[in-house]
Image: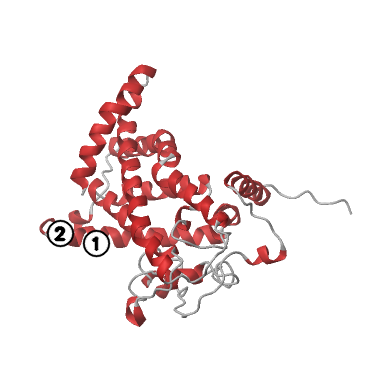
Amino acid sequence: MLTVIESLQSALFERGVLPVLYGLGLMRLAEDAYAATGWVLIGILEVALVWLILRPLEAWRPVETWPDRRAVRVDVLYTLLERAGVIPLVFFFTLRPAVDWLDGRLRFVGYIPPQIEDFLPRLHEHPLAAFLLYLVMLDASEYARHRLQHRLAWWWALHAVHHSQRQLSLWSDDRNHVVDSLIADLWRSLVTLLIGVPGGSFILIVMLTRGIESLAHANVRLGFGVLGDRLLVGPRYHRLHHGIGVGHEGPAQGRNFAAILPIWDVVFRTADFSRVAVPTGIRDQLQGVDYGQGFWSQQGKALARTVQTLVPTPRSPA
């Protein structure tokens, strides 16, 4: 799979991207542009596979049936921007250089990020085991990030874009504020740098994670059984995370935060294995709070909410 993607990446870059960079005098960006081309291709492949596999499932056993699917259409736009459009380009030309600079500085002072194989040399003989350990470590970091998205007021103001969807579907995983998406990309990149995840493993982990997350958001009545639900996040398990009165309420400010492995929710007591199909959204939407209907209104309202959490409200005179 990776070999095919690399061949397509090289062909697209040499015939399409490189001439444009040369014509604009931007050859200094060639390395980042090449990497971005690869992620765009991966994103296009993911979108195609997700639609071909999950859309029939949604049609077969939907949790909800919506006469009007206009609210879903904006999530299609989010998915295209996130996986095959603007977001990868913005990351590679803004935040990726910062990560590379940090990597260079760490190496300059003598710190070379260790790999699991450095501590467990026998893993060199078992690449699959090494891959699974990296997957577990990155999944744990994603759980931590997700908890912070709900804990920190300014971050929740951005993350609420994701939770405000009342029609949860296979497209909803990438329904995020642009700033939130860039923070997530930066988070993953820094964690990957610090624990030394190999490039090939990182690509496969991201593809696997995004595929499972798309399934988890799908509008389909599907669980993996009593044991399976405790081993892998699925639509039934994750829908509770988006449930009104469930997804952002309670002592933990939500439940079922895990991206792939529910074990993190079990360990930190945020797991809920109830077999109920709850309505999705945010509680204050029932009182008329508007999170926006289209892409630009959702982005703008989220920024306004974020500013409100960061700027103290002036006290009225006594």
Residue 89 vertical position relative to residue 238 in the rendered view, above or below: above
User: Disc 1 residue type?
Assistant: Leu
Cβ–Cβ under 8 Å for marks 2 and 1: no
CA gap between label 2 and label 1 equals 11 Å
Return the residue found at the far right: 318
Asked if residue 212 shows in the view, the reply is no
Location of the C terminus (image quadrant): bottom right
Quadrant for residue 11, please give it.
Answer: top left
Q: Position of residue 207 (x, y in %)?
A: 31, 53
Residue 250 vertical position relative to residue 86 in the rendered view, above or below: below
For label 1, the SS is helix
Numbered tag placed on residue 132 in the rendering: 1
Taking 119 as reference, is 188 left or right? right
Q: Position of residue 71 (x, y in %)?
A: 56, 56
N-terminal-most mark, 2 or 1: 2
Q: Residue at x 26, y 37 (%)?
A: 9
Numbered tag placed on residue 123 in the rendering: 2
For label 2, the SS is helix
Q: Position of residue 229 (x, y in %)?
A: 37, 76
Q: Residue at x 28, y 49 (%)?
A: 203
User: Disc 2 residue type?
Assistant: Leu
Label 1: few (<14), some or many (≥20) within 10 Å?
few
Residue 177 vertical position relative to residue 60 in the rendered view, above or below: above
Return the residue found at the far left: 125
Q: Residue at x 25, y 46 (%)?
A: 199
Taking 174 as reference, is 209 left or right? left
Q: Residue at x 34, y 51 (%)?
A: 48
